[in-house]
């Protein structure tokens, strides 16, 4: 009898829904926190001359300078916080997917157990390791036992069935690892563009100060230039951290994928070698 097509389990669907809720809430909360930091920390009256926000910042007071950089700043702060929130969340998820022990050592142990034919012991190691890598390898080992219990099956078709089982389980596990990485990838561009927007608004204010009749308003000119530079720096910092975190996380996922492929290949090859 042909195997019925696999469908996403309720647990996977629930995990996906909770992930979407986390992403939505995190974005909103980060923007709110960014605004609160801008308004009540950087906009604290103690940062300004005579304790008034409309006055110039105290000499050397960077909080007041950032506050006067305009309404683009809280947006940039929210984006910057989002980079860290989503990066930490992915680190936690990928750490759980790796399991309780070192992935490389686990794969090598499974390979050595395969060579001795200790399939049940290898399955027990998967239960001990846990995580996405162990789940995929366990699915392949269980399929190995299943086809081995039916000696009448064609060995080539059985090997393909094991490989297909591993591929299908991988297809269910890997999207959870890559979830929300698109947010980090988007923040790379949005951080730069938002910083550029702040730069443009700051330069508009600076040139408007120069365009006044008579002597230029030095305070407005300084505020405009300061706004442009602060927004530029914050946007670049946001994009830089987003790129670094994205590359680190994708490298970790690639390492897990390689471990799965390595173990899956060993399972298929072991079966093919033992059932020629």
Image (tube, helix red, strand yellow):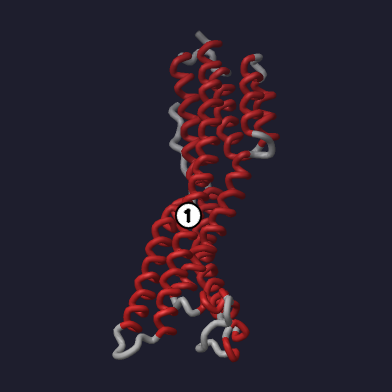
**Which residue occupies the foreground of this view, 128 or 64?**
64
- Total labels: the figure holds 1
User: If the image is split into quadrants, where does the N terminus sit?
Assistant: top left
Q: Is residue 70 above or below residue 17?
A: below
Q: Secondary structure at mark 1?
A: helix
Residue most extreme to the front: 215
On the image, the x and y values in percent for residue 67 come to 51, 78
Q: Is residue 11 above or below residue 200?
A: above
Which residue appears at 55% of the width and 28% of the height? 140
Q: Is residue 242 left or right of residue 137?
A: left
Which residue appears at 57% of the width and 85% of the height? 48
Q: Is residue 228 above or below residue 68?
A: above
Q: Is residue 181 left or right of residue 144?
A: left
What residue sits right under mark 1 in the picture? 240
On the image, the x and y values in percent for residue 71 come to 44, 77
Q: Is residue 263 above or below residue 61?
A: above
**Which residue occupies the foreground of this view, 140 or 83?**
83
Which residue appears at 55% of the width and 33% of the height? 136
On the image, the x and y values in percent for residue 162 come to 50, 24
- Badge 1 crowding class, 10 Å Cα cut-off, few under 14, some 14 to 19, many 20 or more, is some
**Which residue occupies the foreground of this view, 35 or 46?**
46
Which residue appears at 68% of the width and 36% of the height? 101
**Corner quadrant of residue 183:** bottom left
On the image, the x and y values in percent for residue 108 come to 63, 24
Residue most extreme to the top: 276
């Amino acid at each position: 009898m042909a195997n019925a097509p696999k469908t996403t389990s309720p647990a996977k669907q629930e995990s996906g829904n909770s992930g979407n809720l986390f992403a939505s809430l995190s974005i909103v909360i980060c923007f709110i926190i960014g605004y609160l930091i801008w308004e009540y920390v950087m906009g604290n009256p103690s940062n300004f001359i005579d304790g008034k926000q409309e006055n110039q910042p105290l000499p050397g007071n960077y909080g007041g300078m950032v506050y006067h950089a305009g309404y683009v700043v809280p947006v940039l702060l929210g984006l910057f916080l989002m980079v860290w929130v989503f990066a930490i969340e992915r680190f936690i998820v990928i750490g759980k997917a790796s399991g309780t022990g070192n992935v490389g050592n686990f794969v090598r142990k499974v390979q050595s157990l395969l060579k001795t034919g200790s399939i049940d012991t290898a399955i027990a190691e998967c239960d001990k390791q846990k995580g996405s890598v162990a789940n995929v390898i366990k699915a392949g080992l269980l399929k190995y036992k299943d086809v081995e219990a039916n000696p009448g099956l064609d060995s080539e078709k059985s090997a393909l069935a094991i490989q297909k089982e591993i591929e299908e389980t991988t297809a269910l596990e890997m999207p959870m690892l890559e979830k929300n990485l698109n947010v980090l990838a988007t923040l790379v561009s949005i951080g730069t563009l938002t910083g550029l927007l702040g730069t443009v608004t700051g330069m508009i204010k600076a040139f408007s100060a120069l365009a006044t009749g008579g002597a230029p308003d030095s305070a407005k000119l300084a505020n405009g230039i300061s706004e442009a530079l602060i927004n530029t720096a914050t946007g670049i910092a946001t994009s830089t951290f987003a790129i670094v975190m994205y590359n680190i996380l994708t490298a970790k996922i690639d390492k897990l994928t390689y471990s799965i492929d390595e173990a899956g290949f060993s399972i298929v090859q072991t079966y093919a070698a033992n059932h020629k």
